[in-house]
Image: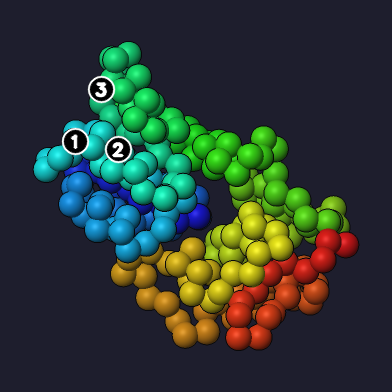
């Protein structure tokens, strides 16, 4: 999952990026509203983590602008402002959730997963496709009832496909899911991860549409 973190505090930003990266997220970090707006205009994000007290512009203004676009990104406000009026303003402007600093990184990950489920109209935390089950919370994969060990990149790639069953994702779309700003992408990285997933889960689990991309195979 690709996340945009909008946070001007270096200590908080570094801790959040490190924690979410360890959880398998790809995190781009914007330190002010201008950087955030450039990022949002250039790259689709599934989740935006938005501080309200930015140095150049209010986070609420950034949120209002985002909601005027066609973006369907989930927005979680991260702020030290804990007054009820501030929470109401954030939610009414279009935020999906509101978390007051200081917060626990495990709770932040849980809230990200929850807003994503709501956005996708899915209450169940597990992703299931035939005999394949993925648990984004625990990073567990079950194939035909048995646990399968996946690397962080393999898990993220498989999660991207399972979140959109029946959809074809291009190589570029999968690379965007796996690598953030400045991340070095090897020319055949996606193909290597697909190859490893097929070895672990069966050759028919992921289909290739030549020249187009990849999608999940028929559930079995």
Camera-near label (1 vs 2) is 2
Report x, y in % for residue 177.
Answer: 49, 63
Which of the numbered marks, if any, corresponds to residue 136? none
Report x, y in % for residue 140.
Answer: 67, 51
Alpha carbon distance from label 3 to label 1: 13 Å
Q: Secondary structure at mark 1?
A: loop
Q: What residue is pinned by disc 2?
A: 64
Q: Is 96 placed left or right of 67 in the picture?
A: right
Q: What residue is pinned by disc 1?
A: 58
Report x, y in % for residue 52.
Answer: 24, 33
Residue at point 85%, 53% (across, down): 145
Q: Secondary structure at mark 2?
A: helix
Residue at point 58%, 36% (across, down): 118
Disc 3 residue crowd, few under 14, some 14–19, many 20+, Cα 10 Å:
some
Residue at point 36%, 48% (across, down): 69
Disc 2 residue crowd, few under 14, some 14–19, many 20+, Cα 10 Å:
some
Camera-near label (3 vs 1) is 1
Q: Quadrant of residue 153?
A: bottom right
Alpha carbon distance from label 1 to label 2: 10 Å
Q: Secondary structure at mark 3?
A: loop
């Amino acid at each position: 999952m690709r996340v945009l973190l909008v946070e001007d505090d270096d200590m908080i930003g570094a801790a959040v990026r490190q924690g979410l990266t360890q959880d398998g997220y790809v995190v781009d970090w914007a330190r002010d509203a201008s950087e955030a707006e450039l990022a949002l205009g250039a790259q689709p994000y599934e989740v935006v983590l938005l501080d309200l007290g930015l140095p150049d512009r209010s986070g609420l203004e950034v949120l209002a602008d985002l909601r005027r676009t066609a973006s369907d990104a989930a927005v979680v406000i991260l702020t030290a402002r804990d007054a009820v009026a501030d929470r109401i303003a954030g939610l009414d402007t279009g935020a999906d959730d509101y978390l007051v600093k200081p917060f626990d990184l495990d709770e932040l990950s849980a809230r990200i997963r929850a807003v994503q489920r709501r956005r996708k109209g899915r209450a169940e935390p597990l992703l299931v496709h035939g005999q394949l089950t993925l648990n984004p919370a625990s990073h567990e994969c079950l194939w035909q009832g048995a646990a399968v060990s996946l690397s962080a990149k393999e898990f993220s790639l498989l999660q991207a496909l399972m979140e959109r069953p029946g959809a074809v994702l291009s190589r570029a779309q999968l690379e965007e899911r796996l690598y953030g700003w400045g991340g070095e992408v090897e020319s055949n990285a996606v193909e290597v991860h697909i190859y490893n997933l097929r070895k672990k889960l069966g050759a028919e689990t992921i289909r290739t549409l030549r020249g187009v991309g990849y999608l999940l195979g028929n559930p079995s």
